[in-house]
Amino acid sequence: MMVLKPRMVVGDDVGIGKTLEAIIAHTVFKTQRPDTKAIVFAEKAALKQWRDEFEWLTTLKTKIISTELFPNSKQRVSAMRNFSSDVMITTYGQAYNYLPYIREGLGDRFVFYADEPNVFKNIDSQLHKRMYELSCQAHRSYGLTATIVENKLEEAFGILRVVSPGLLSNITDFYNNYCERRKLKNRNMLVTVGYKNLDKFREAIEPGYYGRLQTDPEVEQDLPEDLHKDVPIILSKEQSLKIVEAMDRIIQMPEGDIKQLGILPSLIMAQQLTNDPRVAKFDIEGGKIPVLKELLLGSLKGEKVIIFSKYRSMIDMIEKELTKDVGECVRITGIENQAGTSETSKLRFMDDGPNGCNILLITRAGLKSLNLQKSGHIFAFDMPWSYGHYRQFVGRVKRTGSLFKKVMVYRMMGVLHPEVAELLGSDDTIDQHSLRVVMKKKDLFNAVTGDVTTIETTPGELKELFDEIRKGKKAA
């Protein structure tokens, strides 16, 4: 498909092989015109993987240009301007700072590849403007993402505007045709509160978007079945009371248009208290880690296991507790990327030998562009707040080449102590609210990618989770 279309988003589902598709397509472009170069933009954790797969599948010469390999800015500029290899692999941050030099090194004919282009989805950002400029100058342009919509339809517009300029009309027409808008109270500003005509939107983007779902017959047979299991964890009375205090602060926030900056700290506090109050500096042991230990020492002993949390501080605590009682852990949280050790963590996790490690801890930094088929078990210590992130999370283990026919996805769901729950009329914590919001956002994603053509939900990022908590409290 990439050979047939010069500009498109390849939206194949997580784990099907978008990187492989791009590399095969580029060998065709290179054969047709040997002077064609390539620029691949990716997150730091994926740079080496791109290089390794190019070298494994082709004879093309690749070069990674990053701050780790070229610490001095003058060295980076020189490497960009005097680029003589076939494929330049770099991060989006380099484009932000050094676009003219990248452009100079690519020459007159090049192909633009954006791995996980969600990073430039905001049309008002400087990175979006730089990516748009470079894509327009490219002979061909491709975006590779399984999550063209993570939270809002505007994200798909932002990605397609860069990858396939001219496919959609301007942002004003996009709002008029596909968005329900209203004015913020006491402010001269319009915000999106819902979407319309999604079947027409799918038709509009069809020339510039192609994606296979994991459920499509031709790919489903190659992927393991994913089984999702909620692990309810009854929290102590002391922990439950702290959670209720945090939830009440959210409930009591004023009605009307609330800034997300005000919502976020409240949601984070509620989640930290549900995960483990010690992360929020309270001397109260959480209920989740003991259950995790029990599983890892019991039915999952000796298995390769991935554990996700949104919070690096939570990963720090999990690592400390598991290392003490269960075994050594390796991790990918973003800090390791900067230190150049994320690849070491991945290799040790994938190693079955004496130097291998069975427990991998990840934050959002480990959700994308990592092949971890050696594991058949992945834990959500806390739920992502984006359906796109949830898909990426599951996709670490549900991938082509998996060693398993079935993979288990465990969602660790804290529930309030029965005595506290009886007073409130519900045992829900932020975990249950997060899961409901994420599953609602699934409908928007499916409407764009082809599972369904209508939705009944209204996306709203953090405020949607905020409203879900308030609604649940009132219903109780």
Image (cartoon, rainbow, N blue to C red):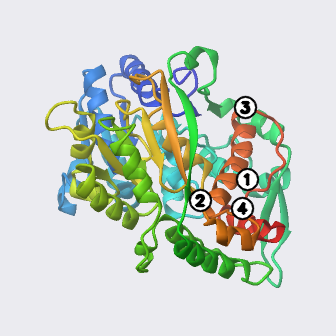
Q: CA distance from mark 4 to mark 3?
A: 21 Å
- Precedes in sequence: disc 4 or disc 3: 3
The residue at which mark 2 appears reads as 122
The residue type indicated by label 1 comes to Asn
Residue 43: tell me if it is visible: no
Residue at 48% across / 59% down in the picture?
A: 127
The residue type indicated by label 2 comes to Asn
Quadrant where the N terminus sits is top right
Please state the horizontal and vertical placement of residue 175, each as a whole percent of the image. Answer: 79, 56
Q: CA distance from mark 4 to mark 2?
A: 15 Å
Disc 3 secondary structure class = loop
Residue sticking out furthest to the front: 419
Q: Are marks 4 and 1 in contact (CB under 8 Å)?
A: no
Q: Are marks 3 and 2 in contact (CB under 8 Å)?
A: no
* Left/right of residue 240 with respect to residue 358 in the rendered view: right
Please state the horizontal and vertical placement of residue 81, each as a whole percent of the image. Answer: 26, 49
| Of labels 2 and 1, the one closer to you | 2
The residue at which mark 3 appears reads as 450
Q: Are marks 4 and 3 in contact (CB under 8 Å)?
A: no
Disc 4 secondary structure class = loop
> Is the residue marked by circle 3 packed among few (<14), some (14-19), or many (20+) residues within 10 Å?
few
Disc 2 secondary structure class = loop
Residue 243: tell me if it is visible: yes
Which of the pair 20/207 is nearer the observer? Answer: 20
Q: CA distance from mark 2 to mark 1?
A: 14 Å
The residue at which mark 1 appears reads as 170
- Precedes in sequence: disc 2 or disc 1: 2
Please state the horizontal and vertical placement of residue 256, each as a whole percent of the image. Answer: 80, 79
The residue type indicated by label 4 comes to Gly
The residue type indicated by label 3 comes to Gly
- Precedes in sequence: disc 3 or disc 2: 2
